Amino acid sequence: MAEMPEFSLLGKIELPQGIKTLSYEQLDLLANETREAILYSVSKNGGHLASSLGVVELTIALLRVMEVETDRIIWDVGHQSYPYKVLTDRFSRFDTLRTFGGLSGFPKPSESRYDAFSTGHASTSISACLGFATADMLIGRKRKIAAVIGDASLSGGLAFEGLNHLGSSKTPMLVILNDNEMSINHNVGALSATLSRMLTGDVSITLRRDMRRFLEGIRARGLSKLARKIEEGAISFFTPGILFEELGLRYMGPINAHKIRDVEKALNTAFAYTDRPVLLHLATVKGRGFPMAEKDPENYHSISSFDIETGIPKKFNGGKTWTDAFGEALVKLAEKDEKIVAISAAMKDGVGLTQFAESFPNRFFDVGIAEAHAVTFAAGLAAAGLKPYFAVYSSFLQRAFDQILHDAALQKLPVRLCIDRGGLVGQDGATHHGSFDISYLRLMPHIAIFLPRSLYEFEKMLFISADYDGTLAIRYARGAPDYDNVPNAPVILGEPEIITEGGETAIISAGHIFPEALDLFSLLKKNGRQATLINLRFVRPLNTKTLLDAVRGKKLIITIEENARFGGVGEMLTPIILKDNPTCSVHIAAIPDEFIPHGTIDELRRYAGLTAPQIFDDVRPILSKLS
């Protein structure tokens, strides 16, 4: 891999303070160099590319207008914060982006004093910024507060809760709407359609141009008050600003966000308002400056390492992923059962529903960034007699805890939660690890939890789910499974798979981490110890008699899972086992009680103590006593 390119400004000027001293010609050069730095690091380490390339000029303008030592900027979701990292205090370390021990792919206060708030999930910025602004008012502190939120994140319910409170409180702060007509997939929903139509329609463009000329003429005659009234009325008819004005915010825009001088001027104007909050509407191009990303922003939203010249990813594992398997199996199910419908929260491609959407367009629903709504919507569909499958990343499903509990489980409705990226997910880090889903789902009565170890089991469990009468969750990992040589056995609802029997030790594996359990089994065998190896398959329903019969009389039982220790499978099984066999030792191998950083899956399993050699070392003292 080549070294970071040499730059004439980056690495030569003091950041971020030196940005204020540059000419606009130099600022354009700085924008180009920032894009080059981002392209280099993302091509090397992977990451969120298109969204970050789209906000380079906005970032520069913010750093010109604001004093980021004391002022506060919160980047919604945070995946577009790469330019901000480069241009504050992290340029020299930017090539470590998303590597273990290196820079996070999201804002992280522990990483830099310039990061005001940790973000990684959508729609949080307005509420958080209002908290900062309200605190400042209470203690008499004067500083600028800005939330940068994308048009897709604005569709999330939390964003509207924040806007509602912000407008009614009249707290002065700035909301910057980064309108690129994209989230991860093409945006959905009435709000996005309205913004797009208002911004790009030919009639709208002509009317805004003519209105601007008309108002300039009125002001030239000294009739500024009349011009102001006409301007406010025009907002209602010719821009999407009526929505925000009615909520109590002063609306400005839309403005081309790739002209630094114009954005800087607009920011200064917006911050001059002190009587109420302001929404500044900026139009950006996702992937700006990298033609392949501009042409295909969906695929370049989040990408693995790639060749800059060709755009082709450098790493191919060649195996079918869990997500691929889910999409294929659901299409097979839907071909046989017309009651099956699928739901995505603005993640159609990411969760493997593209083929389903193409095959059954009337049975596919993308609800936008609205996981809570998606679950209750699914509950309504289920109550009406359909069979909804909601495919969602584990860390995003956390946002719908109450809806799962109250709207699905309480009513025993057949809502199928297909939980992608369960367990450790790699370079996206703490905000995206699916470490807690088993724990919080296990709290809820009536929810079935399926944990496949292989694609074969996954497909069989999906087919079982089609006729399951109740709320259920199928949990699987990111990427392709680590294949093992254990033959597939029939999958029976609630029955664990007893793979081998013998010895004084038993290993109980929960889900996709099974290869580590198999390696541990091999390590024990190499050290002269036979063991019983069990693939749990189901958390609920679970035939505990089968399980207890298999582990009865064992001196040591090891449970292995890629979930938080507290509330996980090990904690569930321990009292069940000890009641039947009170003299045995139970060792729980699980994610420790902390937020796990970013890195490769192998690095993070070692960090969490979840590799077979580490588990073997942990139980070695117990094994010695058995000897």
Image: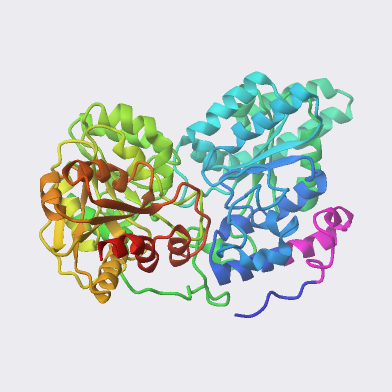
Examine the rendering and report whether any part of residue 344 can be seen.
Answer: no
Q: Is residue 229 above or below residue 110?
A: above
Q: Toward which corner of the image does residue 267 lie, by quadrant?
A: top right
The image shows residue 282, relative to residue 2, as above or below, that is above
User: Which residue is more in the foreground, 529 or 186?
Assistant: 529
Q: Nearer the viewer, residue 414 or 601?
A: 601
Camera-nearest residue between 278 and 325? 325
Q: How is the image coloured?
A: rainbow
- Please state, as top left, top right, bottom left or bottom right, where the C terminus lies in the image: bottom left
Q: Nearer the viewer, residue 556 or 337?
A: 556
- Is residue 505 in view from this perspective? yes
| Position of residue 185 measured from the top left corner of the image (x, y, whole percent) | 45, 52
Magenta stretch in the rendered image: 8-33
Task: Tell me where residue 205 appears, x and y as whole percent.
Answer: 64, 42
Using the rendered view, name the quadrant where residue 199 is placed: top right
Q: How many marks?
A: 0
Residue that appears at 30% across and 48% down: 570
Above or below 152: residue 621: below
Residue 214 lies, in percent from the top left, at 77, 32
Q: Which residue is depicted at the point 37% across and 53% down?
A: 590
